[in-house]
Amino acid sequence: MRFSRPLVTALLCGALLSGCGEKTPPSEKAVEPTSTAAAKINATPLVTRPDAPGLTANYAALRKQQIANVDYRISVDLDGESDTFSGRVVAETDIARPLRNPLTVDFTGGEVKSVSVNGKEIPFEYNGYFITIAPQHLPQGRNNIAIAYTHPYSTDGSGLHRFKDPQDGNVYLYTHFEPYKANRFAPLFDQPNLKASYTIDVKAPADWQVVTTSREDRIEELADGRKHWHFPATKKFSTYILPLHAGPFVVWESKAGNIPLRLMARRTLAPNVKPQDWFTFTQQSFDFFQKYFGIEYPFRKYDQLIVPDFTIGAMENVAAVTFNEAYVSRGEKTQAERQKLANVIAHEMAHMWFGDLVTMDWWNGLWLKESFATYMASLALATNSEFEDVWENFYLRSKQSAYQADQLATTHPIEVPVPNTAEAFSNFDSITYGKGGSVLKQLPHLLGKEAFRQGVSSYLEEFSYGNAELKDFMDHLGKAANQDLSRWTHNWLYKPGVNTIAAGYQCWDDKITVLLINQSAPKEYPVRRRQKVQLGIYRLQDGVMARVAAVPVIYSGAKTDVKEARGQPCPQILTLNDEDWGYVRTSLDNRSIAQVSQHINAIESSFTRLMLWQSLFDSVTDGKMPLSEWIDFALNNAGAESDINVIRLIASHLEAASAYAHRFDIAEPLRRERLEAIENFVWAKINTSPAGSDAQKVWFETFTQLAHTDQGLGNAAQLLSGELAIDGLSIDQDIRWQLIVLLNRHLHGDYAKLVKDELQRDNSDRAQNYAISARAIRPVAQEKRAWLDNILNKRDQYKLSQIRAAAAALFPAEQLNLYRDMSTQLFGAVPQVSDTKDTLYNKAYAMLFPIVCSKADISQYAEALKQNRDLMPALGRVLQDRRQQSEWCMAMEKSQRRGSTD
Ligand SMILES: [Zn+2]
């Protein structure tokens, strides 16, 4: 369903315009089928687009009414030397009826040389954000708008980004446009529902590859020694997924069926790339998706480029996907890291259909494509890959991040109105990805797998090369499953918050006689939901805690009487979301808690152990279990764990526990004792885990995060120098840097010299970021001040990736004293940072703010939020979260005090 005209007019009247109170309601005129063209012109309200960055939903809706059938020809001139590039855009577009309002073309931060319409140069206005063309220059019918321009390359990973490799001096360019940055590359109508085809030609240095959606059909040699690449017209798609990447990339080639594949990386990174993994995962995913969707891959070829300074994981540019270089390791990857790579490959590929072929109408639909790709990537891997623990990984990553975010005050419904493109940016969060993906994951359980698949397939079929909305998607699912999903949609997608379920049961003669599921909702969001979960009944048999029954059940409302459970064996442990079908927090009954604390390692299913370990740590962060009690439990039981995912979870919780122990106001000897116990345990695990195993690597990574004793730091220094070696543990270049950052964090040995010497050995781009982290993390007030000054006042001298490296390292949990000394300055700069309106910079600045654990520290958050009510969401939301997480920290500390005095 598209915006109907009455709705559009109503929206415009409500939010944007004065002059809506005309005698005849404009909406009626606008839909009157027999009204004349003149009446329609008069019915369209006059709109002045404010001189401001970004694009509003209302204005985009108006523009959608003005133009249709856009096709672009884009010519750009690139070289390896300049800071700017030049280009020319020809936009052909239909104008169905005479325009009353000016037409604007989005173009942020460039210079406009000339504008012509239908071959005639015309006067125009340009305010740095968009070009305005007066209506009298744009007659009804097909128009040809030509714009010549220049624009600086960017260094913040958006628009057309330029990267110069410090190792060999080569220059690489790539585009990243989502949500509203295509207009930093060329003047365009930069909104998702103005789909267009693109015919591109590029002049570039002779040794460069040039990559976009279509493959070139010819390359000419130019007199100046460069080459001129010509790319034929593409199919229609939205501007935010238009790619143009260029540079002397190394290229690997393969095929998926008859789809040509290419993989590219910059020259100095290439020796570390393992193309076989990339191609295998790509081929397996293509195989899965083409069958699952029942629609052949629509864009003919598929390129994947690994690019530097990338601000996110990966981006689904049509047929020319970009990936963060962090997916390339300089040593051996663990299986989990390989799976992460396979997952991101599948995620972006899912978008070729869901997002690229069928696209949201506006950014309120962002969640649907992201949730869908998040869920689909795991489904693809679970169905067609070497990995057998895909849903455990989904649970570890997507689910946990969603539960976290959904309990914060900044949570929001999955589907939210997005008034402008700045808000769109701040919705790339754990609700959009993690919760959305989790909610979709439960649907096939409720509707049936095949019905879900059919709904998806027919939805994609109907809206191919077009735009669609949530209702379209739900209609197709509902039809395929023959169910009315309106209530489901309302409760799950339009209401925030996570429910908790608990069970009450009675047994007679060792059988369940009655079992009730009680569902509660947070005070702020009193919605109780309906979904299908599975209950797991566990009993100890011959030393093994085995699942003796699984009971699928659809619960809803406050109480559900689970008749299916009657007559089942009386549980020793009862799990309420066995195998993680549902999106819900579960509360263990007391009997189960007692059994878990005695028999966690006897539980047969590793997935169940994983979920139970998580439950235990949740009870710490909920302020129910004292932290020290959990630490004791973990150190007593984690040693026997052999499943890699459970080990990963416990290791991350031990790291978090160490950070909390630093934040708590507790007696120093107690703190020291617990922190040392954790470090010693982790060190022992490095030495006793099977040599070369993933477990050994995981424990080692944890060690580099929490080692702090003289003994531990001495070991780290010796591993770095080679005086100490551990069987199976290879110290690759990235691990070397992690050790150097650790030694700087604790000012151990000649820490400054280590950084200097290592830069001689490794002067890669990645090394420079590590070196920045190592300097910023030193517990030295002077260093901190210098880096804060760089972040605030010298940001033009650093790339965004470097600002982020410094910000992330500046205030670790054990350095809260240094943070306190500078907090006035940190908070004082908040308005100045927000006023830059630069979302990526605001997000980076937000990384400086830690979780604190005292009233005085929390009051600074409260004060900053009170004084600055209109902060950029990328910063303001983080400050809100930190305040709330800090309050939780105080509740945990209180529970710790209670626990230690009892
Ligand atoms: Zn995505």
Image: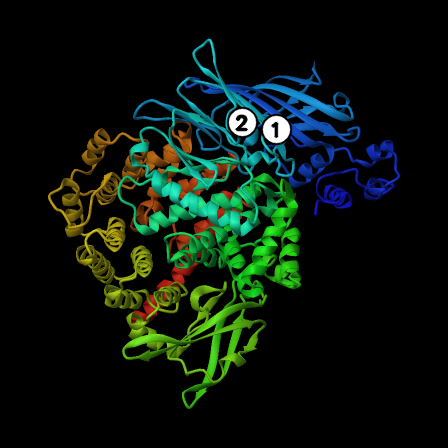
Residue at the image point whose x is 58% and y is 41% from the top: 357
Q: Secondary structure at mark 1?
A: loop
Q: Toward the viewer: 288 or 545? A: 288
Q: Ligand 1 near label 1 (Cβ, under 8 Å)?
A: no
- Spot the residue most to the front: 258
Q: Are marks 2 and 1 in contact (CB under 8 Å)?
A: yes
Using the image, determine if residue 409 lies above or below residue 599.
above
Give coordinates of residue 617: x percent, y percent: 36, 64
Q: Secondary structure at mark 2?
A: loop
Using the image, determine if residue 111 lies above or below residue 278.
above
Q: CA distance from mark 2 to mark 1?
A: 9 Å
Residue at the image point whose x is 75% and y is 23% from the top: 138
Q: Residues within 10 Å of mark 2 (few under 14, many from 20)?
A: many
Q: Toward the viewer: 400 or 605? A: 605
Image position of 256 (left or right of 59): left
Q: Which residue is mark 1?
A: 188
Q: Which residue is mark 2?
A: 185
Using the image, determine if residue 685 lies above or below residue 538.
above
